[in-house]
Image: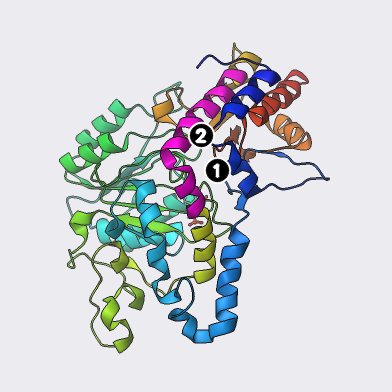
Amino acid sequence: MKFQNSLPYAKQIDKADPLKSFRSQFHFPKINGNTPIYLAGNSLGLQPKSTKKFVEEELTDWAKWGVEGHFHGNRPWLYYHKFSKKILAQLVGAKPIEVVAMNQLTVNLHLMMTSFYQPTPTRFKILTEAGAFSSDQYAFESQLKSHGINPDIALIELKPREGEFTLRTEDILQAIQENSDQLALVIFGAVQFYTGQFFDIAAIAKAGHRAGAMVGFDLAHAIGNVPLQLHKDEVDFAVWCSYKYLNSGPGGVAGAFVHERHATNFNLKRLAGWWGHQEKERFEMKKGFVPMPGADGWQLSNFPVLLGAALQASLQVFEKAGIKNLRKKSVQLTGYLEFLLNEIDPTQKYFQVITPTAPNARGCQLSILMKRDGKKIFNAITKSGVIADWREPDVIRVAPVPLYNSFEEVFQFGEIFKKAVSKK
Ligand SMILES: Cc1ncc(COP(=O)(O)O)c(C=O)c1O
């Protein structure tokens, strides 16, 4: 696509955008009566207008039925975790049995690691990207310590080459191979939260398995953003949150994927709760945990229905838009943002986009590494009506989301950013 740096051009692509009607299905924040340019869907997605109706339906059922709401109403609460399966499975490229909505991301990471990180005296190392999200780092560290293993010895954190910002796939594969005698788990953030790099899931999974390790992914920045095919890629497990690209609201219910080949492996160690027990016996209160097959067998507690209602509302929007259509627009929208940024500072004197340029190596987020006055420039664009986010030490992350952001907004962002940079 040949882009142009002009408002009429941006408006023209918006007009031709087959997904343009979805923007009006979301609430946009207002600041001093104005709608900001919201480029923070990678942090907290906007609220679909339908969310209120979905949540109110459950409040009404609660008022109307009390405890009997577990069996009555449009979506009986007893089965609530099942209602999101079909679309979640589509979004991560899985079979419905392989996915479940539950808990929060870090809780799910611990549940998965309890099952899929089984160190032995010779095979005990975890390989991940350097600078993984703090909560993941704490999970790795505490899991290692719970097995009596020193993280300084057992945690391999891969850094990009000198002078580079993102990891090369060949270097990841080589590191996996070099550690193949001792590796127990390979785990990456599928889309890296800081750099926006979308890792090659298939290649990493293949290499990890060849090395004799389990392979997992944190999909916090990937689900609803990039195409995924976890089943085909034979990933062992994955976890995600739903408040970013899935627009399920702050603290929304998270999810997990467990590959079908582990569905009936009841010998896997796991932490158990009644919601993971065989459904037909769940209320018999019998002794002895018998897990349900598939991802459902990792559930602990009864489902958070009000959070689930918000998730339902959002997934319905995704179902209508279609993830393939969204990805198509996303590649163009982020490409346009990159084009405009390159026009502002072609010699990279003031800033540099560190997210990979290849569309298949990134989602919609671009991470702008600021070389001088970064925080001041960030504050200036915020003052001018842009909602983006600042990540210490020196990165501004911007994520044009195809469901609700427009080419015009990306153009306006470019103008505001140019002005803020030129003043410094
Ligand atoms: C990559 C990544 N992993 C983990 C988390 C933590 O998620 P939660 O608070 O839902 O456990 C986040 C939160 O933003 C994240 O971005």
Q: Is residue 141 visible?
A: no
Q: As displayed, is residue 347 above or below residue 420?
A: above
Label 1: element kind: loop
Residue 337 among magenta residues: yes
The residue labelled by disc 1 is 42
Q: x, y (%) of residue 382?
A: 74, 37
Q: Quadrant of residue 336?
A: top right
Q: Quadrant of residue 200?
A: top left
- Give the number of callouts: 2
Q: Is mark 1 within 8 Å of ligand 1?
A: no
Hey, what amino acid is under mark 1?
Asn
Q: Residue at x 25, y 72 (%)?
A: 291
Q: Earlier in the sequence, mark 1 or mark 2?
A: 1
Q: x, y (%) of residue 247?
A: 55, 51
Q: Residue at x 32, y 55 (%)?
A: 257
Q: x, y (%) of residue 322?
A: 44, 42
Q: As displayed, is residue 229 above or below residue 116?
A: above
Marks 1 and 2 in Cβ contact (< 8 Å): yes
Q: Quadrant of the C terminus?
A: top right
Please provide the residue range marked out in magenta.
Answer: 315-340
Q: x, y (%) of residue 394?
A: 61, 32
* Mark 2 Cα-neighbour bin, 10 Å: few <14, some 14–19, many ≥20: many
- Looking at the rendered structure, which numbered label has been put on residue 364? 2
Q: Residue at x 49, y 65 (%)?
A: 308
**Front residue of 272 and 183:** 272
Residue 286 among magenta residues: no
Q: As displayed, is residue 5 above or below residue 319?
A: above
Q: Residue at x 31, y 66 (%)?
A: 296
